Image (cartoon, rainbow, N blue to C red):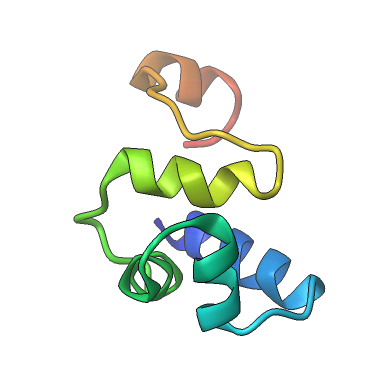
Amino acid sequence: MNRLAEFVKQRRKEVNLTQEEFAERAGVALTVIRKIEQGKTNLNMEKVNQVLAMFGHELGPVSIKDSTQSGEA
């Protein structure tokens, strides 16, 4: 979750938006942005994807086998 948190926070800052402004543009509640940027683990995947869509990305399931083969583990 830390990679997601850092990605969203960095990208939000690159486009010079506050958390409030970004939440409004992404169509999610401010609490969603705060939870993502704080690295919370109890996130709604649909809401996370709404946020990531702002940057042309999407979160999806990845098998443990696939992630270890790509050098992530």
Towards the viewer: 37 or 46? 46
**Measuring 26% from the left and 53% from the top, which residue is drawn there?**
43
Image quadrant where one finds the N terminus: bottom left
Give the left or right position of residue 46, taking residue 44 as reference: right
Instruction: State the residue at coordinates (62%, 60%).
Output: 7
Q: Quadrant of residue 26?
A: bottom right
Q: Nearer the viewer, residue 47 or 41?
A: 47
Residue visible at 49% across and 64% down in the picture: 5
What count of labels does the image hold? 0
Q: In the figure, residue 53 lies in which quadrant?
A: top right
- Tell me: residue 55, above or below residue 2: above
Residue at the left extreme, as displayed? 42
x%, y% of residue 20? 51, 81
Q: Position of residue 62 (x, y in %)?
A: 41, 21
**Residue at screen point 52% across, 68% down:** 24
Vertical order, 21 against 11 (above or below): below
Considering depth in this image, is 31 or 3 the residue closer to the camera?
A: 31
Which x, y percent locates residue 10?
68, 70
Picture quadrant where residue 12 is located:
bottom right
- Using the image, determine if residue 60 lies above or below residue 38: above
**Left or right: residue 28 compared with residue 55:** left
Q: Is residue 25 left or right of residue 64?
A: right
Residue 73: horizontal and vertical position, in percent? 47, 36
